Image (cartoon, helix red, strand yellow):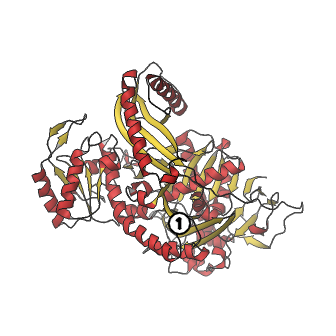
Amino acid sequence: MFGVDVGGTFTDVVAVNDGAIRTAKVPTDLHDTARGVLRGADEIGVGDASVFNHASTHGLNAVITRQLPKVAFLTTLGHRDILDMGRTWRPPEGLTNPGWRRSFGDAARPLVPRYLRRGVRERLTATGEELIPLDEEHAREQLAVLRRCAVEGVAICLLNSYVDGRHELRLRELVRAELGDIPVSVSSEVSPLAKEFARASTTVVDVLMKIIYGEYTKRLDEGLRRLGFAGSLNFADCAARLIPAEIAMEHPFRIVFAGPAAGTMSSAHFGRVVGARNLLCCDVGGTSCDISLVTDGEPFVDTTFELEHDLVVNTLSNDVSSIGAGGGSLVRIDSVGELRVGPGSAGAEPGPACYGLGGTQPTITDACLLAGILDPGGFAGGRMRLDPDGARAAFESLDCGLTLAQRVRYAFDIGVHNIAEGLFNVAIKRGIDPRDYSLIAYGAAGPMLLPAVLEQMRARELIIPPYPGLFSALGLVSSDRVYSDSRSAYQMLTSDTAASIDTVYRQMEEAVRDRLAPADRERAVFVRTFDGRLHGQTWETPFVEVPAGRITPDSVDSMIANFHKSYAERWGHAFEALPVQGVTYRVHAVVPSPKVSYPEAPVTSGRAPQPTGKVVLRHLFDDEVPAAEYDREALRAGDRLPGPAVVREPTSTTFVLPGQTAEVGRYGELHITKA
């Protein structure tokens, strides 16, 4: 099994074969990400693999940077500005700022410029009745404009089409006739759910991803075949569930946020292995820090997520909060002379100053090098030599009155504080007590920074899993293949609606079953849920359990009881006297897949582990502090390492602070606690 996680700085590749885990970490090729993936796959031998599971931030980064193809948006006449208005929500920092504007609005950086958003004369009612027939002549006039503009794809989202998509489907036929065989996404197929803006934004993201990932997937598949790979190519979705590549490309909006989600899935799987079922997950890479939550062994899953504030995508996703805090976070002096860290990043090109690739601004990685945490000759398994003089010159170039030691120490402390603040925000948002949770740190920079975060949070412990620098990629060999469908239909849950609800579920299950490979149809486990609300509410409580089999009046009673139970668990109170309305109905077909098994580490002989050397920690404390240096591969289960200590491995470095102790667990993981 192969798992590949394409990040903004590095591409992580893992291979699992007969219990043995092989890894590779290669720089991400920002100009051709497939090239970096193929380089890593070739490095550890992909020819004998049966599956190749892929996750990437390629599409996400394209949206964030607006390096997007030119696409058009067709909607009901008079409603083309729904993409500009969004949901009219402001973030906290924009509530008192009259100059705040949405990042994707017409006054900023729209995904689709207003001149490419065209209205078409038609209208269906909320019950699917035709109020205004589709005016095909008017539609052709709008398509003529788009033809002159040479658009590369079209997103179609008409009002109320989630009830009946016949106007959208006819409009797609007209697009094909007038504009040729270009990618087209229609909302009644992409996201047949209520709430117009979320459906519209999801459809736009889908057509963008079709263009971005379409050619990429073809190049990747052809490259893998040239390397001798003859297995199945799968993509991970935003909940890190696996989808065959050809099905993923039908609606690729579901894979736009797959990379961060894979880390959460990997944490949940490993947490179940070591008995840590409540986890605050922290993936610190070169560009960002992705924070997520695992409770009772399961990731916290949402029905939507935001690419940017208010830019909504309708797909199930692991709840991941991203902040601009990573190894490549830039250290700078702001306009009032204060030292700041992030959110800007040096990225893979040019990278931190110590990489010697043209970077001149200092970063957290430069600070850790000058502090003595990083080994200049052993970085990335010895494949890259770091330049301390370049790091020192970058810090000395800052225009401030601080000494070099102060600059390095403050940069490190602020970077750690930024991560701690992000973790506290997630804990508060989800109403959990960090004392009931363990931190788990991964990503190349996670083990280097999270021990210092542990000093600020009263979590149970900090876990450093095996292969932390490639841990998200291991999440891609820790997941199942899942086929999903969902539809909206506003119906009060009563005995009278049992038949119509049963029809919805049977139609969805038949559609999902048709997409399954013949060999998977017997193994697939079908799971039903629905999103419901109390009568008169605006927002839904998601993932309420639904009984299997035919929906009868008794089944509806069970759905109502399950709703009130879920409502109380999620919101802390229940209103069982109020009627319940079903809004969105969901079906998942779960096909169990082989998962990575972690080999047990050799057990310690009882003797204290022997350091491989000594390092001197500078700048982070009032005086220089000597620290023991260990090779992680030489450690044994049961070994205890008193801090300060530095543990080195090819893809990461763990920094154990003074007053902390690291103990090696059964599978080679490190458990760091206060001594």
**Residue 338 x %, y %:** 51, 62
Q: Toward which corner of the image does residue 24 lie, by quadrant?
A: bottom right
Q: Nearer the viewer, residue 150 or 593?
A: 593
> In the image, 254: left or right of 599?
left
Q: Toward which corner of the image does residue 501 lie, by quadrant?
A: top left
Q: Residue at the location (39% across, 59% down)?
A: 249
Q: Nearer the viewer, residue 498 or 405?
A: 498
Q: Nearer the viewer, residue 276 or 45?
A: 45
Q: Residue at the location (24% across, 50% down)?
A: 169
Name the element at disc 1: loop
> In the image, 384: left or right of 600?
left
**Residue 402 x %, y %:** 58, 69
Q: Is residue 414 visible?
A: no
> In the image, 192: left or right of 320?
left
**Position of 343 relative to 314 (above/below):** below
> In the image, 245: left or right of 2?
left
**Residue 28 x %, y %:** 50, 72
Pointer 1: residues within 10 angstroms few (<14), some, or many (20+)? some
Query: Residue furthest toward the top?
Result: 577
Instruction: Identify the residue under disc 1.
Output: 231
Q: Toward which corner of the image does residue 23 lie, by quadrant?
A: bottom right
Q: Residue at the location (32% across, 58% down)?
A: 207
